Image (cartoon, rainbow, N blue to C red):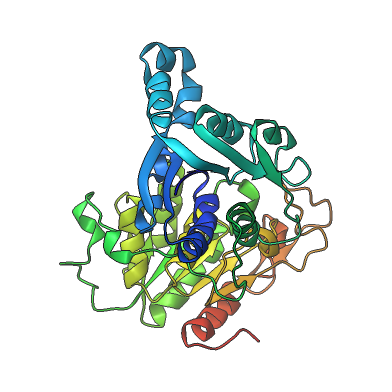
Amino acid sequence: MRILIVKVSSLGDIIHTLPAVTDAAKARKDVVFDWVVEENFVEVPGWHPAVDKVIPISIRRWRRNFLKTWFNREVRSFRQRLRSEHYDLVIDAQGLIKSGIISRMSKGLTIGLSNQTAREPLSSLFYNQSYSVPWNGHAVDRVRQLFSRALNYRYSKQLVDYGIDVSCIKDMGHPSTTDMGHPLKELPSVLFLHGTTWATKHWPDAYWRRLGEIATAAGYRILLPWGDERDKRRAELIAGGNARATVLERQTLSGLAQHMLRAEGVIAVDTGLGHLAAALGKPALTLYGPTNPDLTGTFGPRQLHLTSNIECAPCMKKHCVYHGPPVFDTAHDESTQVRPPCFAAHKPDEVWRQFERLIDGHAAP
């Protein structure tokens, strides 16, 4: 039985789909998956042994110059490749209009979420069959429910297996993805995942710097990845003056996964890479301000979520809507205003204390 998964982006959403693939592969021994995914994330589905073909799509790039893409036949070539296989089922695990269109372009019975439970209700127009999955569940469980109903099997909510075969994580990029020759390689490492897309999800830079000082004083070295030039500047600011903090060369996803596998743990804001740490089974402390970890937080064992105690959180807004009095960092510098204010509860000293408890195997108090 060959099934096409349509889950093109983002990184967190793609990782949220992996446990459903594991469930299906355990329940149906004859099942094989192909997967349509945005080209930037093409490595990830291939880490799961039940996924055969990974079909890249380039929607983000095509949008910038669709006419040029159309005339150089890239869109038509993608469609031809998609339609070269007849699928027993096509599961749109994303619930967006764009993913619904991709599902309909393929050959096979299309499955997706109903118009009452999809993120974009009009996506249900592209399905032959749709299912209602409650909104109040975590994204991982919503996808698991969709797959189980489409393929008629049961699964245990208490057992979550992302199914990643770490032997498939092979980086062919920059040689700095290994620690060979690093002067601090004997020290245990912690990854700081400081980059994220929303302005409201950024933990204050001054807090990151203070956390780096605390971590290195405790005997760790800090690894700082980055995705774009703004991220790189922030990484350099966090590392500035700290001999045990390293700004990594730009990494592939496989390269970052290798760093995570070797690290003691991860401290992150709400970002897709935090979900990668969870999928790899690494202890991860994630800082949440405007977003709700109950719906889309890192999922699995050894995951600790620190949430805001400010009245308007979680607001789920990309731009801060706080209108109260300014919030200042009274712990270190009373003149420093905390922006966004929902992160004022997450002081670096307390974050590190909680992280040490996490990697030592203790639950948060």
On screen, residue 267 above or below 170: below
Q: Position of residue 213 (x, y in %)?
A: 44, 73
Residue drawn at the location 32% of the way across and 55% of the way down: 254
Count of all numbered marks drawn on residues in the image: 0
Q: Determine the image quadrant of residue 327.
A: bottom right
Q: Is residue 53 left or right of residue 146?
A: left
Residue drawn at the location 83% of the way across and 57% of the way down: 325
Q: Position of residue 54 (x, y in %)?
A: 37, 43
Residue drawn at the location 72% of the way across and 32% of the way down: 122
Q: Determine the image quadrant of residue 53.
A: top left
Pick the residue in front: 80 or 117: 80
Q: Position of residue 360 (x, y in %)?
A: 47, 88
Can residue 44 be seen in this snapshot? no
Q: Is residue 8 left or right of residue 288?
A: left
Quadrant containing the C terminus is: bottom right
Can residue 123 be seen in this snapshot? yes
Q: Is residue 165 left or right of residue 359?
A: left
On screen, residue 299 above or below 79: below
Q: Is residue 90 left or right of residue 252?
A: right
On screen, residue 317 above or below 350: above
Pick the residue in front: 18 or 21: 21
Q: Position of residue 271 (x, y in %)?
A: 54, 55
